[in-house]
Image (spheres, grey):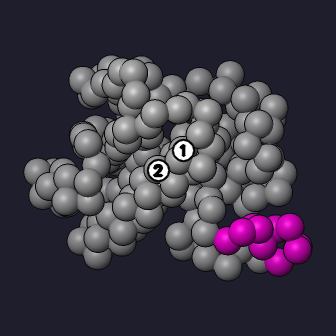
Amino acid sequence: MDTEQLIQYAIEENFTDAKVLGTDELVFDDSFRPYCEENLCGQYGVNYSCPPVCGTPEEMRAKILSHKKALLLQSTWEISDYTDKEAIKKAKSAHNAAALRLTKKVRKEAGDAFMIGASGCALCSPCALANNEPCRFPELQYSCMSAYCIFVRKVTEKCNMEYDCGAGLLTFFGMILFD
């Protein structure tokens, strides 16, 4: 798949920045997994895309490394109050919706691809796991960067992307893996 075209698709989906890198360039740090276990988001053990159900750090890393390339996506949102949970949720949802649309385009052109979101999967509320049912959308389900133990700051530095965009701005990152 043409890298420049892929980045153009990302810009058309209103991502602030996008870069393609090899999966061998990603930085993993298993020490991020305990943050999931703190369950600040409330999804630990109750969402198929979140730990411990999604897999161990080793299994998640293997899933990523089974692909050759990663498209790192950044979206930036203006925000007046960092405690405004509703505004944050809306921005995160828009980021993930755009990443899902882009993932579908990548699949059409490159075949097998999957998304890593700015949070755990929110396609169903509650997740089918809550009712001991199978995932309703296994081909669209996505886990977050933390579940994969990706050291986002170090990856953004490798890609010359801003990690902290400044006061009044909220930044989310996601990824699409492909070959």
Q: Nearer the viewer, residue 103 or 29?
A: 103
Q: Nearer the viewer, residue 26 or 68?
A: 26
Residue 125 shown in magenta = yes
Q: Is residue 3 above or below residue 102?
A: above
Residue sitting at x 73%, y 43%: 41
Residue sitting at x 71%, y 74%: 135
Majority secondary structure in the magenta region: loop
Residue sitting at x 83%, y 78%: 133
Residue 12 quadrant: bottom left
x and y percent of residue 83 in the render? Answer: 61, 33
Residue sitting at x 24%, y 71%: 109
Q: Which residue is mark 2?
A: 91
Q: Is residue 84 left or right of residue 159?
A: right
x and y percent of residue 3 in the render? Answer: 16, 51
**CB contact under 8 Å: marks 1 and 2:** yes
Residue 98 shown in magenta = no
Q: Is residue 131 left or right of residue 136?
A: right
Which amino acid type is shown beneath numbered disc 1? Ile
Which amino acid type is shown beneath numbered disc 2? Ala
Magenta residue span: 124-133
Q: Which residue is mark 1?
A: 88
